[in-house]
Image (spheres, rainbow, N blue to C red):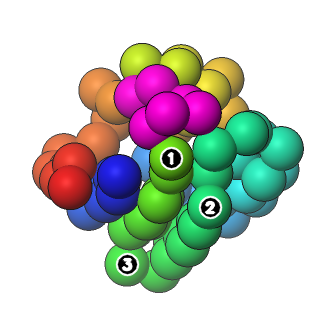
Amino acid sequence: MEFKALRVADLTEEIALNLETTLSDLPGVTEFEVTPETQEFRIVFDETQLGFRTLIDEMSKAGCSLQNINAAVLL
């Protein structure tokens, strides 16, 4: 499954680093790209190992809550 976040207004370099650190240790995350310049990130994960709710909770702990994402796609 792929989660793509667009127009993340609060996506600073610090939050991008927090996301990378948090998600790199999370079982089930297979790919992760973050681009603070365009306020976008992309996470590919195995939903049999990682539930979407858990992913969102971990993103929030890293400083990027779902409420601060203006547009997103779950594929």
Does 5 lie within the magenta span?
A: no
Q: Are marks 2 and 3 in contact (CB under 8 Å)?
A: no
Magenta span: 47-52
From this view, report whether residue 38 is shown above or below residue 51. below
Please tell me the numbered disc located at residue 38: 3
- Badge 1, how many Cα within 10 Å: few under 14, some, many 20+? some
Residue 48 point in image, percent of width and height:
49, 33
Query: In front of the other: label 1 or label 3?
Result: 1
Considering only order in the chain, which callout, 3 or 2, is on the residue closer to the N terminus?
2
User: Which residue lies under the disc numbered 2?
Assistant: 30
Label 3 sits on what residue type? Thr
Q: CA distance from mark 2 to mark 3?
A: 22 Å
Kindly state the secondary structure of the residue where label 1 is placed.
loop
Q: Are marks 2 and 1 in contact (CB under 8 Å)?
A: yes
User: Which residue lies under the disc numbered 1?
Assistant: 46
Considering only order in the chain, which callout, 3 or 1, is on the residue closer to the N terminus?
3
Residue 47 point in image, percent of width and height:
44, 37
Q: Residue at x 62, y 61 (%)?
A: 30
Q: Residue farthest to the front?
A: 48
Considering only order in the chain, which callout, 1 or 2, is on the residue closer to the N terminus?
2
Left or right of 52? Residue 7 is left
Residue 52 point in image, percent of width and height:
40, 29
Q: Residue at x 59, y 33 (%)?
A: 49
